[in-house]
Structures are given as C-alpha cells and as structure tokens.
Amino acid sequence: MTVTREAIAVPDSTGTTIALLRELRRDRARQRAANAAYWIYLVVLTVALYGGSRIAATAHDVRHPPLPTAQTPHVLHAAPYGLTALALLLLLVLVRDALWRGPVTLQQPAVDWLLDTPVDRGRLLRPRFRMSAAVATLAGVAVGIVPAAALVSLGLGGHSVGHVLRLTGAAMLSTALLFILGTGSAGLIERYPASWRWLRRATPAVAALVAVLGGLAAWAALGRLPAAVADVVIWSGPWAWTTQGMIALSGGSAPLWQLSTVLLGAAALMALFWAERAAAGVPGAALRVRARTIGAMSAAVLNMDTRGVALAYGDAAGPRRIWFRLRPPRRRELVLPWRDLLAVARAPARLLGAAALALAAVGLIAVAGHAGQVSVVAVGSGLALGYLGAAWLCEGARLDAEDTRRSAALPFRFESLAWWHAIVPCLVLFVVAGVPVAAVAVATGNPGLIALLAVTVPVLVTGALVNVFRPRFMPDLFGGFETPVGNSAAIVVVFWLILGPLLAVVPLAVLLPSALAASHAGELARAVVVGAALAIGLGAYAARRAAKLYSA
Amino acid sequence: MHVSVLPGQRGLRHRHVPERALVQTGAAQHAGGCGELTIVPDATQPPLLALTGVSRSYGERLALSPIDVSVAAGECVAVMGANGSGKSTLLRIAAGRDAPSTGHVVYAGRRLIQDDVAVRTEIAVVGDMVSAYPDLTVREHLQLVAVAHGAGRETDELVDRALLECRLADHAAALPGSLSSGQRQALHLAAVLVRPRRLMVLDEPEQRLDPAARRWLAGLLLTQKRAGATLLMATHHAELASAVADHVIVLRDGEVIGRGTPDAALAAAQ
C-alpha cells in the first residue's frame, strides 16, 4: 500500500492544562494538605505522649551503649551474610514494585481524562517519579535506623555516643541509597515492559540466593566459614555495598567501606537520573493497568478486605495460565472437593506456602514438646502458623463467600457448604503434617501424637472457615457503642477480623501442652474428645455464618 | 491558539443528497436518512486507517487472528460479535492503546505506535471509562479536555455545544457522583465532542444507555459522520450498526466470519 505521511499538528497545551487542573482542584488540594497536617500532628502527638519516655531512655542508653557479650563475635561473623541477605531482599521488593505499581503512577481519573490528550507525558509523569524517589529516600533513612539499632543492642555499637551516631549515620545513608537505587531501577523496569518477564523469572533465583545467604549467616555464626567468603559476599553487588559501612563501623572487616559507599551512591544516582528521564516514556497501557490495580487495592484496604488487596496485586500480573486439569467427578458429593482441589492446585504458591506453614507449625510444636516443660506460647505460635496454613487452603470457600452467587446453582443447602469446603484443606494438611508427625510418633513410640493431629487439623480448618464466612464488613462497625470503659469500635473490628483464629487457636493452645506433656492416656483422650467437640462446634458455627451470609 | 474541531478533512468529497437516498462508493454504503450533507468516502484516496495482518495473542491464547481492516476517511466501520470475540482488542490496537502481536497499523500515512502523541490529538476514543474526578463538575471535565487539546478561547463555546448535544446542559454544574450511568456515558461522549476528532474509536458506545438514549446516540454519530468524522465502532446492537455503519465486520473467537454492508455481513454471520 502506498500512503502519504500527513503532518499532524500537536497543540502545546500542557502548561495551560496543568494550570487549569490545579486551579479547579485547589480546594481539594487544600483539604488534602489540611488532612495530611492533621495526621502528622496526630502522629507527633502520639509519639510524644506514648513514646517520649522511651525516646528519652534510648537517648540515655546511646551515651552508654551495651557492652559486647559472649555472643557478639558470632553476630559479627554472621553480619556480612545476614545484612547482605536483608539488603538483597529489600532491593528485590523495591524493584518488584515496578511490576504492579511502580514509582510512576497516575490516579484513575488522570488516566481516563489526561492520557488521551496531547499533554506532554514528561511533564505529567516526571513529577510523579520525583515524588516517589523523595518518599523512598525518606523511607530509606527511617529504615536505616533498624539495622543500626539491632547492631548497637547486640553490643556492636562501640564505646561512645560518637561511635553509635557514626554507625547509625552510615546505616541511614547506605539504606537511603539502596532505596534510591531500587526506586530508580523500578522506574527503568516500569518503562521497558520487555524487562518485566525477566524480573518475574529472576525473582525465585534471587529469593533462593537470599535463603542461601541466610544459611551462610548461620554457618558463619558457628565460626566455620573462611573470611574470604565474606569478602566475596560483601563485594557481590550494589546490595552488598550497602552493608560495608555498617560492618566496618561495628568492628568487622570491610576496609574499603568508603569506596563501596561511593560506588553505591554513584549507582543510585545513575539509576535515578536515567529513570527520571525514562519516566516520560512509561507506556499508557501500563499506567492504565496500574491505576486500576491501585484503585482496586485502595477500595479493598478501605473495606479492610485483605484478600481483595492480594487479588488486586495478583491481577496486576495479568491472566494466569491453567496448568492443572482434573476430570469432574460423577458423584455430586465430590463436586465441591473437586472444585476446591482445582482452586488450591491452580495457585501453587498458595499450596506451597500453606505446606511450609504447616511444616513450620509441626516443627515448632515438636520442639516445644521436646523441651520437657511444654511452653504454651511456643505451642500457640505453632498453632497460629498452622491456622494460617489452613486459612490459605480455604480458597474454594473464600471464592464462594466473596460472591454468594457463585454457588447459587449448586444443589446444596448453604449451611452445608462450609462442611463440604472443609474436606480438601483437612486432607492436604493431614498429608503434609501427617508424614513428619507419624515419623516422630514412631521414633518416640507415642502414637497419641497422630490422634492429636487428627483433631488439631479439623479445628484449625473449621476455625478458618468461621473467618471465611464472616459477615460483610460494614463501616458501622467503626461506630461501635459506648461502654463504661470506652467505645467498643476497636474491639468489635478486631473480633470481626480474628474471631476464627481466636476460637480455634486459643482453646488448642490451652489443650495441647498438657496433652503433649501427659504421661497417661486419660489426658490424651480428654484432649482428643474436647478437640473433636471443638471442631464440630466451629464447623456448625461456620455453617451458620455461611447461611446468614447467603440470606443477607 | 486555534483549534479545529475537525482538522484536515482531506480525501473527502462533500455533496448534498436527498433524504433517504443511498450513496454508494465502492464497498461503502450509507443509508443515513435524516441529514442533508453526506461525506462520501473517496475510493481513490488511501484509507485513513489501515490494519494489515494484525493479530493479538495473550500468552498462548490467540485473542485476534490476523485481520486486515481499512477505514476510509468519512466512513463508519462497525465491528460486531459476541463477548470475547476480539472486538475490544481490535479497537485498542486501532487506537494505538495496544501493540499487535503481528502486523501493523497505519494511520494517516504514519505507522502507528503505542502512545503516539500526534495520534492522541486526532483519534478520539470512547472506551470503558469508569472514573471521573470526584470534585470536578461535568462542565469542568469538558473544559479540561478542551483545554488539553488546545481549544483556547473557543473552550466555552465547544463545551456548551457538547453539553447540549449530549443532553447534559441541565447537569453542567453537577458532580459525576450524582449522575446516572447513562449520563456518565453521555459525559464520556461529550468529552469526544470538545476535542479534535478525525477518527472516532467507539467501544460499545451504547452501553449503559436505554433504548431512547440509543436512538439519540445513533443520531449523534450520524451527525458526526456527516460532519466528516471517521468512525470505527464496536457494538452489540445491529440496529445501531445498520443506522450508522457503511461497513460491518463480524468476529467470532477472534476470526472474521462476515464482512460487507450491514445487512450482508450480518446475514453471512448467521
């Protein structure tokens, strides 16, 4: 086809448009500034009132930093690996921001009303990037206090206030530079969509590297790693340069820490400079998707819908690929378990996460049980992890609960849905936790452990279902009602959020320690009976809540 | 600063036709019916918009099979098909909002790339707009778009005319939150009328409109067409396509199953 390229005149309307928008939105901008000032005032007041004494005590402590203990050399050996792992993890999180939000974002109305106009994208988008970079720098400065405080409290703060301040300053500077580097890199990644796939692919490898560094830290703490390995690690990249100042000023070996800080600064500024220039070219399609994601996420946060937040984050990655198929069953009783199995299997991260949580729970409870005097706190922590694992596996129930129309066509009474939805999470947890529990039971000659698992799993799953089928969040909850000890709003909201884990974990945390420590069968039998009754009670309560939800 | 509402009507011939007369030029046929001035696409000129071998895949899923579409200046092409047939994908690519997996798009002789600022000045898109500035009135929204397109002193005149044409004059001072969904859609259409629009890309403009408003929409689009605008429109309504379009493309699962005059294309797709 032969075509003639026609000239298209583009009006230079950017200045007038932005000025008009600013003028039209002046009242709103004033209101937002007033709101921000009010929140800053509230935060300062709260910190001054409740944290004043703590701040004064910290200031006093800084003059006399804690002295090194017997553990301090171990911490110092582990510091290069541990700090590098944390810095790498932080950088990964900052860079992955580009995949769903990115440092360059517009609100939905701006996307809908300005992106299709000839307004210069550079003048529209660069201020957004600069604002993100400024916020990231401030956040980096604040986050830098954390490792410095940890090192000082572990006896690595030196002997004087000057030493502590130098360590804190170095930590704040290097962490701020890391945040700038991460934001700049995220800006560049947001600009070039071809890099998104690479970042997604690299994420598991980087996460594995973080885990390896964590393992090396533990190894180094035992004093079994040569110093040369630490040298390699602290020069492994910009993330590792972040740690050198902290290591050197804590008494560790990083003789060229000034050079590494300069290198980090140069890398951060280069990324910032390039990303600022590239901000104008962020594709409109990416800005549209991000605006939608942020809108959905904000709505979910306002509704206190944590699942909505996760779904909005997941949707930003685009449609998922279906890799698991399972022929539907012929028997109607198996329809819901089949549907739940698909929901769990098609979200492998959820399945793996739940399995990891369940194994961690078993490990924690096993350690607590092995320690002779069984700790309620340790068992409770293990049960809390187990509850989280169970909650992750209740995906099918959650899908039905968030939109009751989804299961309206099924030939089941709504009350019975909760029971059907308990089957798959229970089976998965039995399989995952059953293997190590059975091994321990055989090794210790204590078959009662399997009986305890048999009641613990249903209690955790039915507790999770109680939460899944909770009533819709209504803003009225924030109103609460007046009681002699104050307004009930906070406690009502907390109960709305955590009633399920409260009803499942607390009774089990009381029941299990005595059963684990019991030397006779009676105690064990009592725990099993009470646990079974609890599971039935929680299941019935979840069923009742499901019925109410569907009739609402 | 001066802005033309319909800049550069090259490749068009203007002529009077009697009411209900049919005007045929090549494959383009128009049975407008109610206007006096009709713009007849000129077959000797290159098309204003040409999609050549354009396809779009999302991962392994082929949303749009390779397709050729050309839209002459002053012509209206309607794309029809069930949900998920690829209509919106085709329109997003045609409007430069999405890049095709294969093929290319040429607009006014220039290869279309995503976010081309020159194209943003001439291609007006009515898509799935869902939001508005909650603190700006209907009039202020239109002022914003007009100013952004360089309207200058003509802004108020353009806005008043668009408000009247879109039956929003009584709601000019209203905030978007107080509008019905149909009025919001009308606001979206009004935003197109206050800006230059050589090519209008309309993705189901009839959505959220009741039958009476759909008839008004058909009249509005015919008026635009007669004034020289080129239209590429996705719609579910055969009546709207028949009333406005010269040419209809019917898609199913991303493939063309019928094309031609509205009646012929719809018959072929049955």
Image: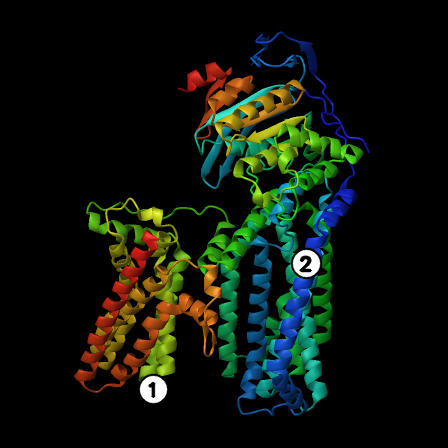
State which chain disc 1 sits on. A
Mark-to-mark CA distance, 1 and 2: 58 Å
Identity of the amino acid at label 2?
Gln
Q: Position of residue A453 (x, y in %)?
A: 26, 72
Q: Position of residue B170 (x, y in %)?
A: 63, 35
Circle on res. A489? none
**What residue do we see at 65% from left, 12% from top?**
B36
Q: Is residue A357 visible from the viewing direction of this image?
A: yes
Residue B53 in which image quadrant: top right
Q: Secondary structure at mark 2?
A: helix
Q: Which of B54/B115 is in front? A: B115
Crowd rating for badge 1 (residues with CA inside 10 Å; few <14, some 14–19, many 20+): few
| Quarter occupied by the N terminus of chain A | top right
State which chain disc 2 sits on. A
Q: Which of A361/A202 is in front? A: A361
Left-right relation of A270 to A185: right
Q: Which of B213/B123 is in front? A: B213
Q: Which residue is mark 2?
A: A31
Disc 1 vs disc 2: which is toward the camera?
2
Q: Which residue is mark 1?
A: A371
**What residue do we see at 75% from left, 29% from top?**
A8
